[in-house]
Image (cartoon, rainbow, N blue to C red):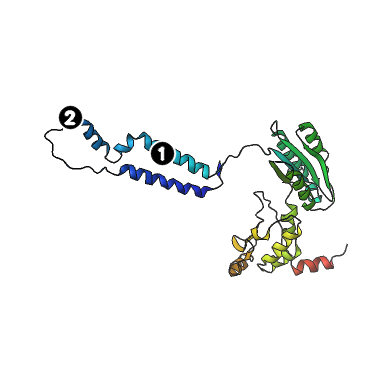
């Protein structure tokens, strides 16, 4: 379980104030009496007024603290994460571009894994849940409209085949958004190899040459992400090189460039880009691009 507004937990400090008031001693008027034999009740109250003894016997204090905890918990907006991969109305976009045909270590293609994940999502749908299947390649194809028919959805997933065509997810995302708008509790899931953004950055010649020249050029990285075709808000983007923040929510951090430049001189470099558009991510390995590499391949003859 997660809390969407964890800062609301600070309101629990009000419990200390409630306890403090219960610890305050009552002010009584002093009086001289011949005997206290008949004042046992008063003596018990005096004992109960001692710190912590009074707390131990106060049902009202316990109820007040429970009400405070319940209110703070509600303000914190708890979020329960279930094992279901999809719920409500879910539009599933499966990327079938050329990069998805690549084979991994186990011999299966990335598209095979994407289809397997999509089937797992369909298998986890509840009785009232629905899903739609969209294939994204050089063109967008709706393989199945929103339906609760698991057999039809599974069949639609099986119709998706590997292609050699390039493509971007922009059109598929726009179509999915239109479908989702007609539903009250709709969500969009993209199953891809990250090629739409991660590989675009890793394969960018401008980024490769910047890495080779130890140039912490965040502009080339952001420009490459923009060419991927995935919509994002530039004011939500962050760029880090080796953990050094160079671009933060639309604002450059040029003062960190010297540190990033030293990191770029290492053999292995970590470039992290956050689009601020969700929790999913992708990891891809690439290399730099040197003048010597271009010269060797330019002189090569078959």
Which residue is found at the position 27% from the left and 36% from the top? Answer: 48
Q: Quadrant of the rendered structure where residue 2 is?
A: top right
What residue is disc 1 on?
Answer: 64
Q: Is residue 86 above or below residue 196?
A: above
Which residue is found at the position 52% from the left and 45% from the top? Answer: 75
Q: Is residue 109 visible in this depiction of the protein?
A: no
Q: Is residue 9 above or below residue 302?
A: above
Q: Is residue 259 above or below residue 281?
A: below
Which residue is found at the position 71% from the left and 44% from the top? Answer: 189
Q: Secondary structure at mark 1?
A: helix
Work out whether residue 294 or residue 221 is closer to the camera in this orientation and state it: 221
Say how many tags the image has: 2
For the C terminus, the quadrant is bottom right
Q: Quadrant of the rendered structure where residue 27 is?
A: top left
Which residue is found at the position 42% from the left and 47% from the top? Answer: 13
x, y percent for residue 100: 78, 48
Q: Tell me the tag on residue 38.
A: 2
Gap in angstroms between the C-alphas marked 1 and 2: 33 Å
Judged left or right of residue 67, residue 117 is right
Judged left or right of residue 301, residue 8 is left
Mark closer to the chain start, 1 or 2: 2
Work out whether residue 185 or residue 228 is closer to the camera in this orientation and state it: 185
Question: Given the current orientation, which residue lies at the most extreme right position?
Answer: 302
Work out whether residue 205 or residue 20 is closer to the camera in this orientation and state it: 20
x, y percent for residue 26: 26, 42
């Amino acid at each position: 379980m997660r809390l969407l507004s964890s800062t609301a937990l600070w309101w629990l400090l009000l419990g200390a104030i409630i306890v403090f008031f219960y610890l305050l001693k009552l002010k009584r008027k002093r009086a001289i009496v011949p005997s206290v034999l008949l004042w046992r009740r008063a003596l018990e109250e005096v004992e109960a007024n001692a710190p912590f003894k009074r707390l131990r016997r106060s049902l009202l204090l316990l109820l007040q603290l429970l009400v405070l905890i319940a209110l703070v918990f509600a303000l914190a907006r708890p979020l329960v994460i279930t094992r279901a991969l999809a719920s409500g109305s879910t539009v599933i976009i499966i990327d079938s571009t050329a990069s998805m045909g690549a084979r991994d270590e186990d011999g299966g293609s990335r598209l095979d894994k994407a289809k397997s994940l999509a089937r797992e999502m369909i298998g986890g749908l509840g009785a009232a849940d629905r899903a739609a299947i969209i294939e994204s390649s050089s063109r967008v194809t709706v393989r199945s409209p929103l339906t609760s028919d698991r057999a039809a959805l599974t069949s639609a997933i099986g119709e998706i085949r590997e292609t050699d065509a390039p493509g971007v997810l922009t059109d598929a995302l726009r179509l999915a958004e239109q479908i989702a708008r007609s539903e009250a509790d709709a969500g969009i899931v993209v199953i891809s190899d990250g090629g739409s953004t991660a590989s675009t950055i890793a394969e960018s010649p401008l980024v490769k040459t910047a890495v080779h020249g130890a140039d912490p050029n965040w502009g080339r990285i952001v420009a490459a992400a923009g060419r991927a075709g995935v919509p994002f808000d530039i004011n939500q983007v962050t760029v880090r090189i080796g953990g050094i923040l160079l671009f933060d929510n639309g604002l450059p951090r040029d003062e960190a460039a010297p540190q990033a430049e030293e990191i770029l001189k290492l053999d292995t470099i970590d470039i992290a880009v956050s689009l601020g558009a969700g929790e999913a991510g992708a990891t891809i390995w690439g290399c730099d691009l040197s003048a010597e590499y271009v010269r060797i391949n330019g002189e090569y003859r078959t």
